[in-house]
């Protein structure tokens, strides 16, 4: 196995639909994001071409990178613990089994504090609210195999969801935002729903409704001969689905409104905005449709100011071609603390 010498550094954010690759001047801030490339996550030749364009003189077989991943069976769930029982043998497995309905012995899991993202202190065990995150152990192997097949060797493997949540909470704190944001990671069969505020991760829910659930509606309403024809049309962006959006998202919205309503009753806070960072550009209309039905705006963050506060500089043309979909990628780079009292450094005037 051969590696490219570490003269440059690389970050990869690999969602169900899209692979975002970035070359940077350093491994940690202060750094300059020199170039970003994007391709379909299920297209190995496109991966190779993107890596070649970012690193044309690559000498080894692999490019080492910090990788954010979104396996379908990932777990990022807020739970309520009984601090007095945390040190009991088997208690956390009991929580994972009963509250998350997973088999903990088949997963690699970690417990984090819900409001600052730090590893939960089992010795002190003073906080009731925590986040259990991880994935099935076998998915770690299959994900690594996919990355290696595409020419990427993970220096560090992270759940991209945590990078998104951490970056967004830090941004909301930086922006002094008072209202929480609804984050929806809409995949084929499941939508991961998160309510994020400047204080951290407020609520989580996995909803068994995703993009594939919209296909039968397309087929029925457009009188198509089969679901495969509907699927191709749906993903092609060759038809304006705006008028059908309420029908296509009806089941998802029902579950979303239920969980949002419960959160708002429990906390007295209303959802202020919504984002769907995993959607590919061709499906961006879904984000607007959901926001309209929830009667809240789509979050349009000033990421440039936040990145500057975290000493991350965007070179041209990166500075003119990024958006919320890059939040996970930037979250992998940023050194931040999810804390309402966190301070933000001033970025240097010139790239170092």
Image (spheres, rainbow, N blue to C red):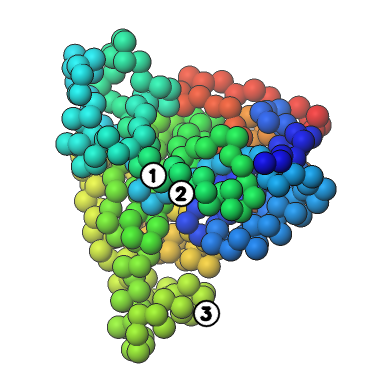
Q: Residues within 10 Å of mark 2 (few under 14, many from 20)?
A: few
Q: Residues within 10 Å of mark 1 (few under 14, many from 20)?
A: few
Q: Identify the mark nearer the N-term, 3 or 1.
A: 1
Classify the position of the C terminus by image quarter. top right
| Callout 1: SS | helix
Q: Which mark is residue 24?
A: none
Compared with 62, 170 (above or below) is above
Residue 289 in the image: above or below residue 273: below
The answer to whether any part of residue 219 appears in the image is yes
Do the CB atoms of the residues marked 1 and 2 lie less than 8 Å apart?
yes
Task: Please name the residue shown 48% across and 66% down the image.
Answer: 283
Whether label 3 touches label 1, CB < 8 Å: no
List the residue tagged with mark 2. 142
User: Distance between the Cα atoms at labels 3 and 1?
Assistant: 38 Å
Q: Where is residue 192 shown, x and y percent of the image?
A: 35, 49
Q: Which mark is residue 138?
A: 1
Picture coordinates of residue 64 (x, y %)?
Answer: 66, 39
Indicate left or right for 65 with 113 as reference: right
Q: CA distance from mark 2 to mark 3?
A: 33 Å
Q: How many marks?
A: 3
Quarter where residue 209 is shown? bottom left
- Residue 43 as seen in the image, left or right of residue 130: right
User: Of circles 2 and 3, which is in front?
Assistant: 2
Mark number, residue 238: 3
Q: Which residue is at a point 75% across and 50% down the rendered structure image?
A: 54
Q: Residue furthest front?
A: 1
- Please tell me which residue is depicted at 21% across the width and 42% down the height of the picture: 101
Nearest to N terminus: mark 2 or mark 3:
2
């Amino acid at each position: 196995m051969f590696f490219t010498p570490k003269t440059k550094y690389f970050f990869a954010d690999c969602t169900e639909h899209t692979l975002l690759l970035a070359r940077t001047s350093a491994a940690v801030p202060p750094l300059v994001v020199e170039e970003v490339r994007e391709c379909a996550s299920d297209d190995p030749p496109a991966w190779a071409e993107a890596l070649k364009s970012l690193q044309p003189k690559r000498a080894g077989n692999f490019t080492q990178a910090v990788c954010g991943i979104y396996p379908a069976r990932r777990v990022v769930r807020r739970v309520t613990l009984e601090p007095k029982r945390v040190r009991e043998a088997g208690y956390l497995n009991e929580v994972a089994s009963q509250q998350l309905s997973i088999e903990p012995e088949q997963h690699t899991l970690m417990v984090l504090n819900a409001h600052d993202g730090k590893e939960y202190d089992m010795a002190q065990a003073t906080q009731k609210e925590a986040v259990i995150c991880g994935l099935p152990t076998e998915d770690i192997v299959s994900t690594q195999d996919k990355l290696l097949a595409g020419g990427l060797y993970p220096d560090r493997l992270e759940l991209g969801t945590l990078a998104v949540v951490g970056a967004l909470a830090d941004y909301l704190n930086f922006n002094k935002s008072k209202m929480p944001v609804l984050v929806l990671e809409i995949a084929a069969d499941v939508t991961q729903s998160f309510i994020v505020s400047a204080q951290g991760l407020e609520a989580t829910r996995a909803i068994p409704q995703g993009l594939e659930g919209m296909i039968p509606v397309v087929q029925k309403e457009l009188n198509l001969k089969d679901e495969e024809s509907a699927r191709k049309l749906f993903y092609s962006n060759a038809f304006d689905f705006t008028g059908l959006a309420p029908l296509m998202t009806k089941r998802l919205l029902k579950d979303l409104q239920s969980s949002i309503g419960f959160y708002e009753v429990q906390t007295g806070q209303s959802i202020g905005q919504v984002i769907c960072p995993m959607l590919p550009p061709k499906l961006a209309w879904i984000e607007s449709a959901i926001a309209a039905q929830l009667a809240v705006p789509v979050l349009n963050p000033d990421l440039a100011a936040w990145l500057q506060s975290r000493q991350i500089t965007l070179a041209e043309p990166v500075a003119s071609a990024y958006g919320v979909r890059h939040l996970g990628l930037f979250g992998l780079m940023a050194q931040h603390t999810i804390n309402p009292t966190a301070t933000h450094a001033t970025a240097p005037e010139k790239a170092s």
